[in-house]
Amino acid sequence: MNRNQLEVFLNVARTKKISSAAKLLHLTQPAVSTQIKALENYFQTPLFIRSKKGVELTEAGQVVQNYAKKILQNFDSMEQEVDYILGVENQKLTIGATETVGNYAIPCSIWTFRDKYPNAQISLKVGSLSEIVRDLEEGKIDLAVMETVTGVDTKEFNLKDASSDEIIVIRPKDDKYKHLENIFFEQLKEYPFILPAYGFGIRESLEFALEQGGLKEIDLNVISELGSLEAIKSSVKAGYALSICSKMAVQKELHDGDLVEVRLVDLVMPITFKVVYPESNFLSTIAHRFLRFIATPDELTLCE
Amino acid sequence: MNRNQLEVFLNVARTKKISSAAKLLHLTQPAVSTQIKALENYFQTPLFIRSKKGVELTEAGQVVQNYAKKILQNFDSMEQEVDYILGVENQKLTIGATETVGNYAIPCSIWTFRDKYPNAQISLKVGSLSEIVRDLEEGKIDLAVMETVTGVDTKEFNLKDASSDEIIVIRPKDDKYKHLENIFFEQLKEYPFILPAYGFGIRESLEFALEQGGLKEIDLNVISELGSLEAIKSSVKAGYALSICSKMAVQKELHDGDLVEVRLVDLVMPITFKVVYPESNFLSTIAHRFLRFIATPDELTLCE
DNA sequence: AACAATTACGCACCACGTAAGGATA
DNA sequence: TATCCTTACGTGGTGCGTAATTGTT
């Protein structure tokens, strides 16, 4: 039994569903399932009672839950105290990010990260891909987060996958689109469509996802190409057309019902953020901590 | 960072030597070294100061030590509390063991194990290999510990390596053997030798070790074959001859100086105990706990 | 049909052992 | 030379994803 299994366990206990925990942890259902089974095998007793609508803690499971919380808290405290000794709080951290990532995906992560180091000087610099790459090379930023890594010298810099987002199709809440729930990509061309402009990040991610999905080219009824997320959101809300964007960028609208997600049955379009950073030796301790943070699967979940 | 690394870390902190910790954990020096390095990389700071004669905790290292102790205690408490719910204390456990293992290697482990379950009914049955195998098949014992597994139906039973002992050459403390410290196996035949009898376990282990070492047959100046460890020890002590036995079996004599170990430079003769047990489903919970215990590397170290 | 969980299988990574190297008394 | 630690490299076990299966609403 190890730390990771306890983290998985706690997420299952909290959500009362293996599938939900898997989503939070950015793992698949079977992965979580086998981890729980391994724990139960270790203790030689069931920790959950499986029922129709999820799982429920057994008595032994409750004991494990209590201790697991304590243990993970101790891990956290240990890291905090070490950080205090190292004076991580006094260090400065400047993160670079491209437009889409920087404006929608990263800010809430930074808030969460700042909670851990409330007195550190953490700043975010948003710019175009080329600007960010140049800043990285000139050492003006400690590390950068972006969707694509074109133009980055992969010999000079390291890459790491961060938590992933997803491209989704959005539609107005109007009743006339009501039947649009689960459709094939092909069917999209029956509706007016707004395409994000190039250089906007998401357009490139879309084309890459289409290629991966075996759908070679964009054959849609494009009524316009817009270079601003706000413009896209407004246009779709107003009922003019469908469009796409990153799911994180419209969390609020989806939740409030101002926009509705159209699920594609034959295509998923994941976005994997890349964190770009120089050789370990050139990284400050707090930059290391941010790397650890952004690579930890469930740290970003507060934002969803 | 995980539980295992903390356990390694604590052993290094306690012994102040990576090599000593490795021995206690039945690991190699590089294995422990890399684990410590991984921890230090995780925290981005040294946890030990390496010096000529070992290692010393840094300030950060002391913090980690304190929390690591807490965390591992919590793991222990968690397991204890789960065991309490499952009523493991009320279960009965009967362990079978062959002569050598049962008389020398296992008893101290059982004491340690009994500390964890003071009210459980734990008994040890020592017998010949065939007796133990029969008891296992008849379900009279829950599991068995032995050196060789000849005669065990490996389809019906599972095997697991437990902590290992070592066969060593012993000599009298007499001054006339004083020059015998580090010699080649070949040189042994210049001295009178007592060989343990077959069926005694260790004889089989010896022949296996010789075969592994590329030394096909026992070409020694054998003056007698004895079937009792006590007889062997007495004879060697009395100065009649050299002999072999498991290191654990003569811990006390080696420490007191009544017997002396002769190191072979061209041959090491490890003994790996095998734990034999039926299908998981047929095992009581406490038997499972004993399996977990005996397979955990550093649980047996209290006996060395 | 849709959702929740399990099982089977292939792959990629990590911890380990072996071997070799370096530093110090 | 002996002791103690580190670095380099090959290998096996474990955790994960994919895909297929079962069971429930």
Image: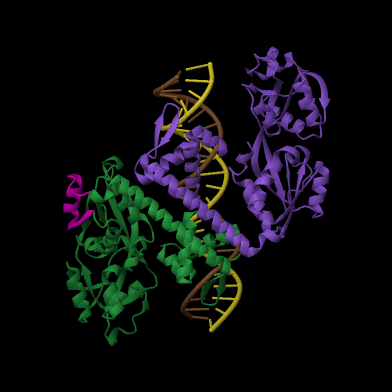
Chain colours: A purple, B green, C yellow, D brown
- Report the side of D25 relative to A285 (left or right): left
Residue B132: within the magenta?
A: yes
* Residue situated in front as seen by the camera: B38 or D19: B38
- Which quadrant would residue A171 be assigned to in this image? top right
- Residue at 35% from the left image edge and 55% from the top image edge: B295
The image position of residue A79, as x and y in percent, is 57, 57
Using the image, determine if residue A114 lies above or below residue B114.
above
Using the image, determine if residue A217 lies above or below residue A87.
above
Q: Which stretch appears magenta?
A: B120-142
* Residue situated in front as seen by the camera: A141 or B18: A141
- Residue at 37% from the left image edge and 39% from the top image edge: A46
In what quadrant of the picture does the C terminus of chain B appear? bottom left
Residue B4: within the magenta?
A: no
- Report the side of A114 relative to B10 (left or right): right
* Residue situated in front as seen by the camera: B53 or A107: A107
* Residue situated in front as seen by the camera: A122 or A210: A122
**Number of marks:** 0
The image position of residue B75, as x and y in percent, is 42, 54
The image position of residue B93, as x and y in percent, is 23, 51
The image position of residue A259, as x and y in percent, is 70, 24
Using the image, determine if residue B208 lies above or below residue A133.
below
Q: Can residue B87 be seen in this view?
A: yes
- Residue at 56% from the left image edge and 37% from the top image edge: A24
- Which quadrant would residue B26 be assigned to in this image? bottom left
Which residue is outermost to the bottom?
B175
Q: Can residue B44 be seen in this view?
A: no
- Report the side of D19 relative to A40 (left or right): right
